[in-house]
Amino acid sequence: MTDDDVATRTRDILQSLWKDVFCTAFSFEAPYESFVARFGHYLPSQDQISAFLAGGEPYDRDKEKWATIPKDMSHSELALELQRIMKDVMEHFKHSGRRVQALHKNTLPVFIHRRYKKSKGIWEVEVVPDIIVTSEGSAYQPISKDEDIDPTSWAAYIQQTSSVVMVRTCDEVEGPEGGPKIEPEAAFYAQQCFHNQGNRLFCFVLLVTEEWAKLFYYDRAGCLETAPISIHDSPDEFVWYLLLISSTDNEALGFDKAICWNAETQVHTITTVDEEDNEVKYRLDKPKPFFRSCKIKGRATTCWDVEGKNGERLIVKEAWRVRVIRGA
C-alpha cells in the first residue's frame, strides 16, 4: 500500500468518525469515581498515591503544582516533561512491564463538513498520538518484522500499544479548531487500536495539557469521558489516571484474555464455545483476523481462521452486543 493509499484510507476513516462522534449519541460524561469503582482494585491505593506525591519530586506539595510544568510550556516541552513524569510514576509503582514511547508528529489535511461558520473545511488532523504506553506478552501480537515499516512510526508499535496519550497546550485546545478536533482525534487513536489489535474490547486515551487532563474510554457502544481535572490541584487523580493507562493487568487495559499470542512458539490461540456451547480452545491459523470492521461503533464483526481438533479449517466469528440490564 502506497503512502497515498494510506492517506486516502485515513481520510475516509476520519470522515466516518466525524459523523459518529458528532451525529450520533456517541459520547457521555462519566465521573472519576465510576472509573475508580470499576478499575480501582487493579491499581495502587489512594494512600500509596498520596505517599508518592508527598515525596517532593516531581510534585511540589507546598506550591501545589508540578514543579516542572509551568503555564508557558511549548507543546514539545510539555510532551517531554510528561514522559518523565510517567516514567517516574511507573518506576515508583513498579509498572516495569510497560514502557513510554514518544512518536513523531504527523498531520493530515482532512476536509470536514461542519456547521460552524468559522470552520475552514480543511483541518490539519493529528493522526499520530504524542505518546503511547507499550508492552509485550500474551496480550500483544508479536513485533512486526516488516522491513518497510519506519521503526520510529506508530505502525512499528501499534501491535504493542497499551494506551494512548494526547498532549496539547491550552492554547491549542482553546483555538477555533483545536477544541472540536480533540474528540475525533482521540476516537481515531482508539479506532486504530481496535482495528489493529484483534483482541481489543476497550481502550483508553488520556488527554493532558499543562493545566488539566481528562480520560476517554472507548468500547463498541461509544465513549465515556471524564470532566477535565486540574493536574495541579488534583494530583492524586492525575497520577491515578497515569497508573490506569499503564496498568500491569492487561484486562484492565481492555484486552480479551480469550485470545493469546506466543511469540516464541508461534502458537496463537482463541478460547470460545463450540456448536454445543462447550468451551473450546482453537489454534489460530494467523495472528490477524481475516476480517475486521473499521467502524469504531457497532457490532465490530471479527472473523478468525482457526484449526479444528482434527486439523480442519474452521471460522470463528465474534461480534459486540450491548447487554441491557433492566431494573426491577
Image (spheres, rainbow, N blue to C red):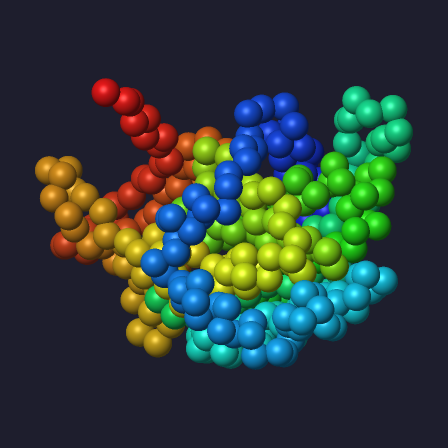
Could you tell me residue 164's position as x and y percent?
Answer: 58, 57
Q: Is residue 34 visible?
A: yes
Above or below, comparing residue 301 to residue 170 in the picture: above
Q: Residue furthest front?
A: 62
Residue displayed at 55% across by 25% down: 25
Residue displayed at 66% across by 40% down: 183
Above or below, comparing residue 265 to residue 321 in the picture: below
Q: Nearer the viewer, residue 188 or 33?
A: 33
Q: Nearer the viewer, residue 244 or 117?
A: 244
Quadrant location, the C terminus: top left
Q: Nearer the viewer, residue 223 or 197?
A: 223
Q: Is residue 224 visible?
A: no
Residue displayed at 63% across by 78% down: 57
Q: Nearer the viewer, residue 235 or 262?
A: 235
Could you tell me residue 118's position as x and y percent?
Answer: 89, 29
Side (left or right) of 206 relative to 7: left
Side (left or right) of 253 relative to 204: left
Side (left or right) of 171 relative to 312: right
Could you tell me residue 167's position as x and y percent?
Answer: 71, 57
Could you tell me residue 158's position as x and y percent?
Answer: 55, 60
Count up the numbered dots.
0
Above or below, comparing residue 68 to residue 1 in the picture: below
Residue displayed at 30% across by 66% down: 267
